[in-house]
Image (cartoon, grey):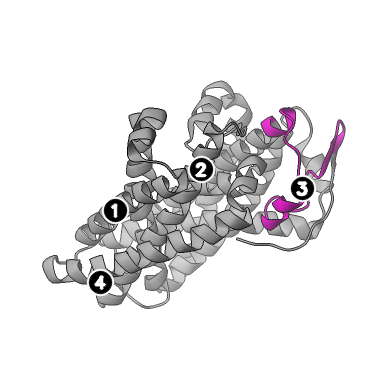
Amino acid sequence: MLHRMALRVLPSLSLAVTEQAVRKKKRIVMFVPGLVAFAVYRLAKLLLPLSEPIVLLVVSGLVSLVTALLAYRVGRATAWGKILREDGNRVLLWLGGWIGFVYGVQLSLLVLALLWLVGYDYLKHPDGPAMMAIIIACTSVARDAFEIGHVKKMALMGRPFPTFPDGAALRTMVGTHAMEFGPWVAVGLVVGALGASLGHLVEASQIAALVQLSAVAVLGGGIALCAYFGGLRPQASWTQALLQTKAGELVKYWWWPGLSFAATYYLVAAGCVIFLLKQPGIPTAYAMTVGGFVTGMMALYCYYLGFRRQVEEQQGHTMSSALLRCPFVMGILGKSTSGGVSVTAGSGSKV
């Protein structure tokens, strides 16, 4: 889901995919696959045992794979032949396999875990959760694939994008800046595991899972926020940049993407434990392992986002009022100084 965060946090990408014309077209791109996914669910229900988690996830992943490729083509706004020539097989394999199948499966597990948490157990009542898992995954994949296709189209037309949301820049950073982000990941691993261990204080499985989720989300959001500033100012004090940002804005950044995506990743992992490993809840050992992994990963991802934001600053990509649509960048880095950050506040948020 790093691509999702990049599309909303990095200014060059955020500006491209939140223009009014793009958002209007995106609504249609999301609506149509949702209807098709419902029809596919109704047909698959007659032919396949969707009450089996593996079967449901495979169906959801395959539907999302096809959706990702079709939505990407709509975003690219050109013929398949030209896409194959200009983009190459690697981009399409990544898009179909990762943004389509893998992301679709993750979103389905997220939906099933959320419903289980509120008492709507897929294993006991499969029809409703199965339908929602397929449709929500399909529409979300359609949205993101369309946005990625639009970014690719703009890039080929000459619009500069220092970061393409395929993870290539992350892999480069991992190979060259391990000493800088390593401590953040280490802290995340420890803090996340300790936070998730609090679930052992509760006996009821669903309440224990809620305690684990809350602890990982809150702590993971805090680590992610600090790591973002660490990546943003690797040569200076991240605490200075943090203190120069208004408290109200920090809460927004902590909430999204920090807390939101930490909770999302934890729920995906919880879905794996409950529906694939057939556990009645999330045992403490599993919770600590997952909590540490999720928080460490959020530290890495948000350090990377801050690092890439710094790259965009260095390359002359400036803030615009359009960026105020994104809660995470609202008010941050309106102006930069050599000694730190001078913040300009904004208002309003649009998805």
Count neighbours of disc 2 (C-alpha within 10 A) and say few if under 14, some if 14 to 19, many if 20 or more.
many
Which residue in the protein does label 2 denote?
A: 297
SS at mark 2 in the image: helix
Q: Residue furthest top?
A: 176
* Residue 351 visible to the viewer: yes
Identify residue type, mark 4.
Leu
320 or 188, nearer to the observer: 320
Q: Quadrant of residue 277?
A: bottom left
Mark 4 or 1 closer to N-term? Answer: 1
Q: Quadrant of the C terminus?
A: bottom right
Residue span colored magenta: 311-340
Mark 3 or 1 closer to N-term? Answer: 1
Which residue in the protein does label 4 denote?
A: 123
Question: Which residue shows up at 56% across the image and 21% down it?
Answer: 176
Which residue in the protein does label 3 denote?
A: 332
Report how far apart the C-alphas of labels 4 and 3 lie in the structure: 44 Å
Count neighbours of disc 1 (C-alpha within 10 A) and say few if under 14, some if 14 to 19, many if 20 or more.
many
Q: Position of residue 312 (x, y in %)?
A: 68, 33
20 or 64, nearer to the observer: 20
Identify residue type, mark 3.
Ile
Report how far apart the C-alphas of labels 4 and 2 lie in the structure: 30 Å
Mark 4 or 3 closer to N-term? Answer: 4
Q: Position of residue 297 (x, y in %)?
A: 51, 43
